[in-house]
Each structure stands twice: as C-alpha cells, then as structure tokens.
Image (tube, rainbow, N blue to C red):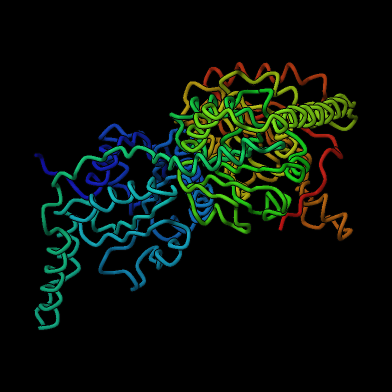
Amino acid sequence: MKAVAHGGDRVAQVLQAHGIDRLFTLCGGHISPILAAAKARGIGVVDTRHEASAVFAADAWARLSGRPGVAAVTAGPGVSNAVTALKNAQLAQSPLLLIGGAAPTLLQGRGALQDIAQQPLVSPHVKACLRVRTVAALGASVDRALKLATAGVPGPVFVECPVDLLYPEEMIRGWYADAGGKGKSLSARLRRRYLKWHVGRLFAGDWSADLPPPSERPPAHPAPGQISQLADVIGRSAKPLLLIGSQAVSGPERADSLAIAVERLGLPVYLSGMARGLLGRAHPLQRFHHRRDALREADCVLLAGVSCDFRLDYGQHVRRQARLLSLNLSSRDAKLNRRPDLALIGPPDMALLALADELARTTDHPPAATAQRAAWLQQLGERDAQREAAIEVQASATATDGINPLSLCKAIENAAAQDSVFIADGGDFVGTAAYVLRPRGPLRWLDPGVFGTLGVGGGFTLGAAMARPASERWLLWGDGAAGFSLMELDSFVRQGVGVIMVIGNDAGWTQIAREQVKLLGDDVGTVLARSDYHLVADALGGVGLLLREPGELAEVLAKAKAAAESGKAVLINAWLAKSEFREGSLSM
C-alpha cells in the first residue's frame, strides 16, 4: 500500500472510508493539511464565514442524511467559537464529528499561538473528547469518533489534532531541528536530543496501516413482550394521543415505513422537530393546535422520541390519571422529570413499527373504547378546524404599516415547492410561521431544537443544500436572528447555493419585547432598526428584494423563486406590520 503523505491525509483517508463526502470548515493554519487532503480525495470542502456556521452545517447535514456530519476548525478561538453549535448538536442528538486543531504537542501550555486548554471547554458538550498524541493514532481516533457519534444516543464527538501531527514528516522534523538550535553547550545538546526523541515518537509506528472497514449496525428491534404491553394499554384507551419528535426520524431511510406505521396505528398525533411533515401537509390523523389541551384530556399519552422537558411543562401537561408511555433511545430522557408507566429504550421508529403490527394482530379491545376513540378524534379535529378558521381571519386582516406576518406566511406556504426544505431561525416571525407552514414530508423542517439557539440559519442552509441539492430551500429569519449569520450569504454566493431567505423585519426582538414590556414596562434592548438587509444581499453578490406593500407579495415571491432556481441566493427584506397574533414567550 502506498504510504499516506502526511497526517492530514490520514484523517481524510478515514473520512473517505466512512463515506463522508462533505467537510464543513473555516480555514486555519492548524488544520490546512486536512482541508487540502480532503479536497484531493474528492471530499467536498464547504467553507463558512464563522466556525459556528460550519458546525451548524454539519449538524443539518447529519439530520437530513442520517450520517455523521463533519466539521473542522482551527485551534483556540476556532474551537471556542464552535461551542454553542456543538451544544446545539448535543441537545438535538445529531451525530457529528468536530475536528479541532491544536498547538504543537511540545508547546502546549507554553504560550503558543491560539493555545488554550480545549478539552475542559469542549468535553461537557460531547459524547467523547479524544486527544491525539501521535500520527499513528490519528486514523484510529477519527475512526472511533465517527463510530461513537452514531452509537446509542447519537451526538457530537471531538477529536483534537495538534498541528505537528498533520503536516509532512520531513517538514516537522526540520521544524524541530531548527527549534533545537546549534549551540554546543550540554543543555543545548540535551535539548536537541530530547527534541529528536520527541519527533521520533510522533512519527513512530505504521501510521499508514489499513483500519478495519466501517460496518453498518442494524437498529435494535424492541422486545416482543414490551410491545405486547404497549399494545394492551393503547388498545384499551379511549382517548389516546401520540407525540413524535426528531429522534423518531433519525433513520431517514425508515421514514416512509414509519409514516405507514403511524397511519396504521390510527392515533391522533402531534409532530415536532424533524418529524414535522412525516404524514404530509394535512393528514386526517395529524393535529396542529391546542396540544396542551389535548394532553390534559388524554387518558393515554405515547411519547416517541419526546421527553418531558419545558416544552411539556416538565410532564405537567399530561394529567396524573393518564397512562404515560415513552419510546426513547435514552433512558435518561425517557424518565426525565416524570417517570412513565412503561418505557421502551431503543429506536422509537422501530418500536412504532412493531406496535402497529402488534395492534393489527389484536382484536379483543373493548368496543366501548373504540366508540369513544372515534368521538375523541372528531373532537380534536373540530377544535383544530376552529383554530385554522381563526388564523385565516387574522391572516386576511389588512395591515397599514407593512405586511401582515400571517399573510406573508400563508403566501410562502402556497408558493413553496413540494420538495421544499424550510430552515427556521428566529423568534416571533418563526413562531408565527410554525403555525402556518406545512412541510411536505419528513426531514424538511430544520429548527434549532431544544436549545433554542439563534444563529443556525446560515449553517443549516449550507448543510441542507449539500444534503438535498435538488430541493427548494427557504430560510426564514427573524431580523434579530439574521444578525448572527447574515454574512453566510457570501458563502451561499461563492458556492452556488440557491436559497430564498425571508427576513421578517419588524425592527425588534419582538418575542422578547412582548413579554418584557408587559411585565416590566420597558422595551430596553429589544429595539432594532428597519435596516436595508436587501442591500447586503446585493453587496455580497446575491439578489436583494424589498417587500413593503401587501400588493407586492405575489410578484416578489415569484421573482425570488425564479432567481433561486437559477442558483442565486435571494434575500427578501419583508417589512412586517405590528401583530398581536402571538403572546410573549418567557420559557423557564
């Protein structure tokens, strides 16, 4: 076998063996050999304008493809800039590998350029933090990290690669030789001897040896006895309710089978996160509104990849008399804040598939429960219809100081293509959009997840573009959130990413202001300007469109779609009118 040229190529070699064909990054001298080697091996190198965006992009790639996303960032501030995005991926349970550069092995802790103690900074936010100390360990460490990222509960893994492990051996030996100087004193000779020993240790062993090929691990099948117990409880329930979250669609290749299983179960269902769109735009079993009321009325609640965190009021939304059932990859998440009556630990989608089969075989459920269930479905459906009618009335209200945000969202819903992927990054505007937009299928809605992180928009869009290059992409930005990653518009333009960005410009951090003004009587820190964001798009090589009047809506959206289809990055600066559609949101 031909020896690899340098440590950076060894990293790229392992990525290639795992089928990784995209690497997200912001360049830095500490990691340059990895980037050059990845490109030479045919791995697409997607560069961003902020390290957080690179990690967000890898996160989105992982969510949409089901494979680990990979990002590489330089040492010190490169790693620290990535921490928020890393934590977001951890809480979203996205399989992700972050490769971080580091100062030379012999200079760490001595004031080298961009040298910080990275492990204490990163380790709380990852499944594992691997520090590589020799070139021979590079391949095995990257291989192990990729396997760890997808094992059990998926999540991010960090691999720290010191710069003197990545560049060519001859260059590193020369660098250490120069560092030893030419002095003839005993201390100088001892220093040179130590440096020679150290560099020999760095490159010792057969660091180009083949690693065992990565193997696919089939998802675990649930125990038949537990499935039988689930089926018995649900079969006897008169008012069952099913909640499905992102974790249930972490195997994208099984999403279609999962949708069929949910339909066969026949339970009213609320979908959240990446599971939005699982049943299409308007399935008769899916409910969109009044989830809290439904949870409080249900006699049996089945959580599939959903935990009792703040979104379910720490389990208080489910009444105490109801049977609580949990399907979750994580034992901790299954029991978080409220212990379920029955927990099945494993892939939620596999459990739902088995449950649908089991219920289809069972015919001895009480007839009374069947009749009550029909009435329950009808009750929830009527409640949903009333809410939809009220939204329709509010969306048709005439605005005098800009665009009615509900009207804008309705127009986007009608204009978006069947294969559209929606990326949501914001507060009030995105919250409004969540009531109106209907993803056409699973894995077509990207939002931060439980961490509530603003700034995901630029990176998520890049990741979505690489994972779904043929899909139409809509990035919905609040004007506050846009400030975190608006510069990624440059990345879109340089890399030919067609996208329609809509900034809901209401000149404020409106979601915060709603609550703050009501409770404290002051809007301090929540006021922004009606900035000309569309001119930023023009300046960076994209297409900027200003939308201020309701009568311009159809024409502007049509122009945006046509430009994005031709591969251009389009930004619509939509001046929003004031709206009382949403209350403030102060979550604890």
In percent of the image, x 52 and y 50: which residue is there?
85
Front in this rendered view, residue 207 or 231: 231
Total marks drawn? 0
Rendering quarter of residue 298: top right
Front in this rendered view, residue 283 or 472: 283
Q: Quadrant of the C terminus?
A: bottom right
In percent of the image, x 77 and y 38: which residue is there?
290
Q: Position of residue 97 (x, y in %)?
A: 38, 48
Residue 27 visible from this viewpoint:
no
Query: Please, which residue is most extreme toward the bottom here?
Result: 186
In percent of the image, x 52 and y 22: which residue is there?
471
**Relative to 554, 194 lies left or right:** left
Residue 70 visible from this viewpoint:
yes
Front in this rendered view, residue 63 or 547: 63
Q: Position of residue 475 (x, y in %)?
A: 61, 33
Q: Where is residue 416 in the image (x, y as percent from the top left)?
A: 64, 21
Q: In which quarter of the image is the N terminus?
A: top left
**Relative to 472, 533 lies left or right:** right
Q: Position of residue 324 (x, y in %)?
A: 63, 48
In percent of the image, x 67 and y 43: which residue is there?
300
Front in this rendered view, residue 304 or 342: 342
**Relative to 108, 76 lies left or right:** right
